[in-house]
Amino acid sequence: MTQLSNYTYDEISIGQRASFERKVEERDIQLFAAATGDVNPLHLDADFAATTRFGERIAHGMLTASFVSAALAMRLPGPGTIFMEQQVRFRLPVRIGDVISVELEVTEKEDKRKAVTLACTARNQDGKAVLTGTAKVVAP
Amino acid sequence: MTQLSNYTYDEISIGQRASFERKVEERDIQLFAAATGDVNPLHLDADFAATTRFGERIAHGMLTASFVSAALAMRLPGPGTIFMEQQVRFRLPVRIGDVISVELEVTEKEDKRKAVTLACTARNQDGKAVLTGTAKVVAP
């Protein structure tokens, strides 16, 4: 198992950044559908997807949102992070084979609850923002 | 495959409700971790989780958030739904074996973009809200 490290509340400063990269594999779509019960044919059925505005299957929006969550849990603050709130806006479709880079930046700290707010952007391999949002977490 | 139906924008009215139920299985945690890359030990490592405020492993917050997304994609509006925005607040931990019921209620319609806003609540088997939030989607 990979060694994981984290940043405690006191070690986190406004403007601090982190990133997390993940390629969307066919397998991930199948696993995500099985885990969540979301078997929307837009994600699983090529014939159905061909009839939509996207023209082909796309990844579940929440799969990309979960990459943001993974970035928070794995990078900044890292393991021990407790999620309070997440807000996401889906901007562009994510296709199988896309390489998604999540960028996090600390925008606020709230000492009383050890709460940290981060701006979150997920970009595809062309640098285009596919998802933007914010997250509020309790740091370890 | 189960037959899926949906509600088009014109068929949706303010106050309309739908629900979606899902039991959190051990398997779902493993699949979700594999799909998203979020291998935070809080979800996967019983010994680590025992040292946290939760005392045991809990489900990824985004797994529960994805049940909300599944409810939108599978029930209301149903297949063909396009996600615009989702906002969630995590209120209580979800444990393996919990049965989560997602309740949706239409709160706004925006004719120009065929956008529908829904209030979303996920409750556990004790009726306690584990997640609350809103979602904005384009209806089919």
Image (tube, coloured by chain):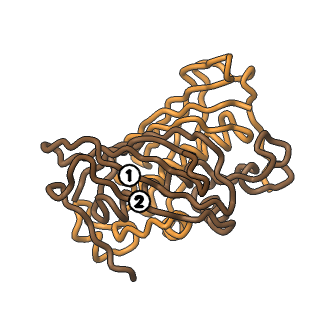
Chain colours: A orange, B brown
Q: Nearer the viewer, residue B43 or B56?
A: B56
Figure label count: 2
Query: Mark number for residue B19?
Result: 2
For this view, does B117 lie left or right of residue A87? left
- Asked if residue B60 can be seen in this view, the reply is yes
- Contact check, label 1 and label 2, Cβ < 8 Å: yes
- Indicate the amino acid at tag 2: Ser
User: Do the residues at pointers 1 and 2 share their chain?
Assistant: yes
Q: Which residue is mark 1?
A: B104
- Residue A128 visible (yes or no): no
Mark positioned earlier in the residue sequence (1 or 2): 2
Circle 1 SS class? strand
Q: Is residue B55 above or below residue A26?
A: above
The residue depicted at 78 percent of the width and 39 percent of the height is: B53
Name the residue furthest front.
B126
Task: Name the chain under label 2.
Answer: B
User: In what quadrant of the picture does the C terminus of chain A appear?
Assistant: top right
